[in-house]
Amino acid sequence: MIILDGKKVSNDIKEEIAEHVKSMISKGDKVPHLAAILVGSDGASMTYVNAKVKACQRIGFNSTLIELPEYTSEEELLQKIHDLNTNNDIDGFIVQLPLPKQIDEQKVLMAIDPNKDVDGFHPVNVGRMALDLPTFLPATPYGIMELLERYQIETSGKNVVVLGRSHIVGRPMSILMSQKRKAGDATVTVVHSRSKNLEAITKEADIIVAAIGISEFLTGDMVKEDVVIIDVGITRVPDATKKNGYRLAGDVHFESVSQKASYITPVPGGVGPMTIAMLLKNTLLARERHNQ
């Protein structure tokens, strides 16, 4: 069993981007500038956004963090988005989800300029992805594809099961894995809360992408020998033995599934770091497009 080390691969990608940025500076080109809008003080969101800012500093990007209070109105947020859309100094930006209840997430995502949508969530970019046209790929699925490529995991003709049908991971993952690409050409099945005979389906899978949002849902008796496991989930599970009172668990029961798996991502340290790395890669792409 081999651990798919997202932390190591993401660091490799960051080093590659940092070298590219040095080359840009030597030519007198403007370095990429990523902005992030954070509404409220959700702990997980703050941690994630701060990690993005630190990653920008490390590789030589410029970064801007816009922090807004929990009570921010939808109109105020849309104005901030308009300001970033029209700011030529900003190459790409994200609005950290989830948003407070008074704000319509869909309206917010629609307001972002597709040319600056480095999260890859705008319908224009989702449509271009579905048509296999150049675009910003959603960062988490993009990171998974990169992980599969860099570990040279064979996907062509394989049975891939995606647990979950979210717009952020499940659906784009199913599209990318079925396309003609290096980590693609697979036969893809998407399962969800209404799927029947779930265990029979997962037992036939050569590769499983677990993004269902239920901690330790996938267990060892639901998979076959030598399966490749990509665990996207991350949940805080109460644990009295830990100083902070909890441990982080994925959607996969690591102890039982890892005994059968040929490759598996850990939680944390698997998919999470890759998501940030691919967000940076999208921002670099945005800068290069602006240069052109």
Image (tube, rainbow, N blue to C red):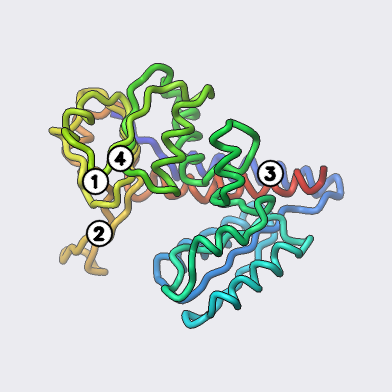
| Label 4 to label 3: alpha-carbon separation | 30 Å
The location of residue 126, given as percent across then percent down, is 55, 43
Determine the secondary structure under disc 4. Answer: strand
Residue 40, compared with residue 266, is above or below; it is below
**Image point (76%, 44%), residue name:** 289
Name the residue that disc number 3 marks.
285
Query: For residue 131, which quarter of the picture?
Result: top right
Q: Distance between the residues labelled 1 and 2?
A: 25 Å
Place of residue 94 in the rendered image (x, y in percent of width and height, measured from the top left): 58, 59
Is tag 1's residue or tag 3's residue first in the polypeptide sequence?
1
- Give the residue at x 62% y 61%: 111
In the image, residue 203 sits, relative to residue 28, either above or below, namely above
Instruction: Give percent across and percent down for residue 112.
Output: 63, 59
Q: Residue furthest top?
A: 157
Residue 238 lies in quadrant: bottom left
Q: Residue 193 carries which label?
A: 1
